[in-house]
């Protein structure tokens, strides 16, 4: 379960729309649980950054905004296991929202996952 204080801090810092807050909380919790079930554990600081990204993702979806594209050189640096965990966890959001997330969103989540996995070693 995500610490409520972390959620409140993120929502305050991002100034999210009310409808986005509820949706972001609900689905971020599902993504968080999926990753925990797959041995991805975020520490206090990395959890804030990761969840900040997820909450902002929901605002971007609502506003029909996209992150800038990333080059293949970044994708080549991502561990395949972290990329798979990212794709699989984000399917929760894709299916719920009826969208396909762009590569940049998937890669950024994979970077967070990879960092968490490396920190857990």
Image: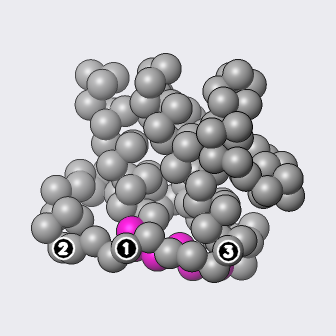
Region rendered in magenta: 99-104
Q: Give the overall secondary structure of the magenta segment.
A: loop
The Cα atoms of the two marked residues, 3 and 1, are separated by 15 Å
**Mark 3 or 2, nearer chain start:** 3
Q: Nearer the viewer, residue 43 or 16?
A: 16
- Labelled pair 3, 1 in contact (Cβ < 8 Å): no
Quadrant of the image containing the N terminus = top right
Look at discs 1 and 2 and give the one toward the viewer.
1
Residue 105, can we see it? yes
Q: Which mark is residue 68?
A: 1
Q: Position of residue 89 (x, y in %)?
A: 55, 54
Q: Position of residue 86 (x, y in %)?
A: 45, 55
The Cα atoms of the two marked residues, 3 and 2, are separated by 26 Å
Does residue 91 appear to the left or right of 111 in the view shown? right
| Numbered disc 3: secondary structure | helix
Residue 39, can we see it? no
Q: Is residue 66 magenta?
A: no
Question: Residue at position x 23%, y 65% from top?
Answer: 75
Q: Position of residue 104 (x, y in %)?
A: 39, 68
Q: Pointer 3: residues within 10 angstroms few (<14), some, or many (20+)? A: few
Q: Nearer the viewer, residue 10 or 95?
A: 10
The Cα atoms of the two marked residues, 1 and 2, are separated by 13 Å
Q: Which color mode does the image show?
A: one colour
Question: Residue at position x 37%, y 33% from top?
Answer: 116
User: What is the quadrant of residue 25 in the picture?
Assistant: top right
Look at discs 3 and 2 and give the one toward the viewer.
3
Q: Which mark is residue 63?
A: 3
Residue linked to disc 2? 72
């Amino acid at each position: 379960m995500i610490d409520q204080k972390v959620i409140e801090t993120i929502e305050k810092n991002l100034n999210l729309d009310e409808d986005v807050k509820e949706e972001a909380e609900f689905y971020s919790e599902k993504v968080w649980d999926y990753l925990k079930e797959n041995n991805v554990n975020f520490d206090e600081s990395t959890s804030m950054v990761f969840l900040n990204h997820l909450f902002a993702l929901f605002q971007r979806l609502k506003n029909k905004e996209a992150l800038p594209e990333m080059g293949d050189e970044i994708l080549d640096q991502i561990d395949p296991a972290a990329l798979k965990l990212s794709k699989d966890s984000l399917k929760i959001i894709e299916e719920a929202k009826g969208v396909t997330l762009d590569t940049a969103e998937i890669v950024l989540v994979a970077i967070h996952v990879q960092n968490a996995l490396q920190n857990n070693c």
